[in-house]
């Protein structure tokens, strides 16, 4: 799955809101970032990628009113 700029932008916004309003600390974000890089090099990476692709596809269907 290729990460699109809108998806990346959305995740940056989510991280910023979590930092500002939910008490996310910088070290929490760094730990999650490191975890993401480590997961990307495991055998679980294709399953995670497929799950995220499925979620994005379902969100696109939902936002388009079920057409597609």
Image (cartoon, rainbow, N blue to C red):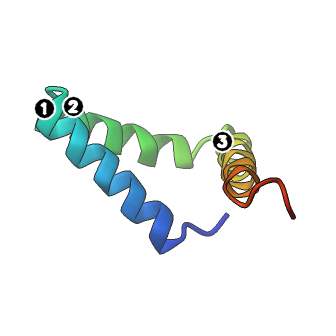
Alpha carbon distance from label 3 to label 1: 25 Å
Q: Residue at x 76, y 55 (%)?
A: 65
Mark 3 or 1, closer to the camera:
1
Query: Circle 1 sits on which residue?
Result: 25
Q: Is residue 65 left or right of residue 45?
A: right
Query: Which corner quadrant holds the N terminus?
Result: bottom right
Residue 13, given in percent of the width and then of the height, sits at 30, 53
Where residue 23 sits, quadrant-wise, is: top left
Camera-side residue of 58 and 34: 58
Query: Which corner quadrant holds the C terminus?
Result: bottom right
Disc number for residue 28: 2
Alpha carbon distance from label 3 to label 2: 21 Å
Name the residue at the top extreme.
23
Q: Residue at x 21, y 31 (%)?
A: 28
Q: Residues within 10 Å of mark 3 (few under 14, many from 20)?
A: few
Q: Is residue 3 left or right of residue 55?
A: left
Query: Circle 3 sits on which residue?
Result: 48
Of label 3 and label 1, which has the lower sequence position? 1
Disc number for residue 67: none
Q: Are marks 2 and 1 in contact (CB under 8 Å)?
A: yes
Q: Secondary structure at mark 3?
A: helix
Q: Secondary structure at mark 2?
A: helix
Name the residue at the bottom extreme.
5
Q: Secondary structure at mark 1?
A: loop
Alpha carbon distance from label 2 to label 1: 5 Å
Q: Is residue 7 above or below residue 21?
A: below
Camera-side residue of 21 and 4: 21
Q: Is residue 67 above or below residue 4?
A: above
């Amino acid at each position: 799955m290729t990460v699109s700029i809108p998806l990346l932008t959305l995740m940056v916004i989510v991280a910023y809101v979590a930092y500002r309003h939910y008490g996310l600390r910088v070290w929490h974000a760094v730990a999650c970032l490191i975890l993401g890089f480590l997961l990307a090099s495991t055998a679980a990476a294709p399953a995670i990628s497929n799950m995220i692709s499925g979620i994005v596809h379902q969100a696109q269907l939902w936002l388009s009113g079920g057409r597609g």
